[in-house]
Amino acid sequence: MMEKNSNHYFSKFPDVNVKIHTISESLRRHLYIFKTITGVFSFNKIDLGTKVFIENMDIPIESKVFLDLGCGYGSIGIVLSYESPQSSVYLLDINKRAIWCTRENVRLNLQDRKKSIFILSGNYFEPLKNKDLKFDGIYMNPPLRQGRKEFLKLLYEIPGYLKTNGSFQFVIKKKMGAAYILKYFKDTFPDEYIEVLCKRSGYWVFRCFH
Ligand SMILES: C[S@@+](CC[C@H](N)C(=O)[O-])C[C@H]1O[C@@H](n2cnc3c(N)ncnc32)[C@H](O)[C@@H]1O
């Protein structure tokens, strides 16, 4: 059965016709090719926030375990794996079309690395329940179109999935309340660490919890 809001990119099964697009994009000086389909977030070109995030996110190169939370067609997680080849990368999204694209894009861009890539479909941390898995880094361009509430709630869950010294990195558009989120974080988690890694093109990139 179709759920409410079935034509949104964050729907489980987006209710729009399928059209395949191909995006080529140079990220951190490497050229990637991404297959995307209608109904997936920013299917016709890489989102500016995603681009700013990828260019400025901090990527440890030693062997680590990363999660691209809300991976869309997989750009963030694929770059993490390319840049940190010894690491394992989990990519997770609720949108089944996004998951299809991610599988295709891993095949296209990371032919030799399939064993260290794990693609999961479901509602945030649900697919990880009972897996006893913690991450050195969780990376996210959060869905904020329906407001900040869901993201703010998620902030409470994140530490439970981070290893000691693990970090959560995310990007927020200034106009979508980046300064509000910074203040909210500092007020809500006064003992936790947060920094703005960069402010560029109207987006703020954050790193926190490590
Ligand atoms: C702003 S988009 C970013 C997509 C991708 N990371 C990028 O930067 O292109 C947010 C993503 O979160 C996914 N998402 C929304 N709600 C979710 C949920 N409850 N569980 C898992 N993923 C979710 C959406 O389907 C969407 O792909």
Image (cartoon, rainbow, N blue to C red):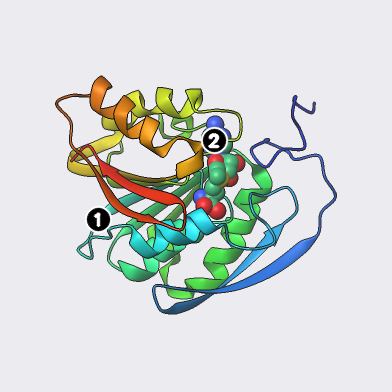
Q: Nearer the viewer, residue 89 or 183?
A: 183
Image vertical order of residue 97 relative to residue 182, above or below: below
Rounded to the nearest angstrom, the CA distance separating label 1 from label 2 is 28 Å
Name the quadrant containing residue 82.
Answer: bottom left
User: Residue 126: horizontal and vertical position, in percent?
Assistant: 47, 29
User: From the Cβ of disc 2, is ligand 1 less than 8 Å away?
Assistant: yes
> Please, what is the three-letter code of the amino acid marked with disc 1?
Lys
Is residue 112 found left or right of 32 in the rendered image? left
Q: Secondary structure at mark 1?
A: loop
Residue beneath the point at 27% across and 58% down: 58
Q: Outermost residue toward the right?
A: 17
Q: Earlier in the sequence, mark 1 or mark 2?
A: 1
- The residue to which callout 2 is attached is 144
Q: Is residue 204 visible?
A: yes
Residue beneath the point at 25% across and 37% down: 162
Q: Nearer the viewer, residue 75 or 150?
A: 150
Of marks 1 and 2, the one in the foreground? 2
User: Residue 152: horizontal and vertical position, in percent?
Assistant: 41, 25
Image vertical order of residue 159 relative to residue 34, above or below: above
> Which quarter of the rendering shows the N terminus?
top right
Q: Secondary structure at mark 2?
A: loop
User: Residue 25: horizontal and vertical position, in percent?
Assistant: 55, 73
- The residue to which callout 1 is attached is 64
Name the quadrant containing residue 208.
Answer: top left
> Which quarter of the rendering shows the C terminus?
top left
Q: Is residue 131 visible?
A: no
Residue beneath the point at 32% across and 34% down: 182
User: Residue 163: horizontal and vertical position, in percent?
Assistant: 20, 39
> Please, what is the three-letter code of the amino acid marked with disc 2?
Leu
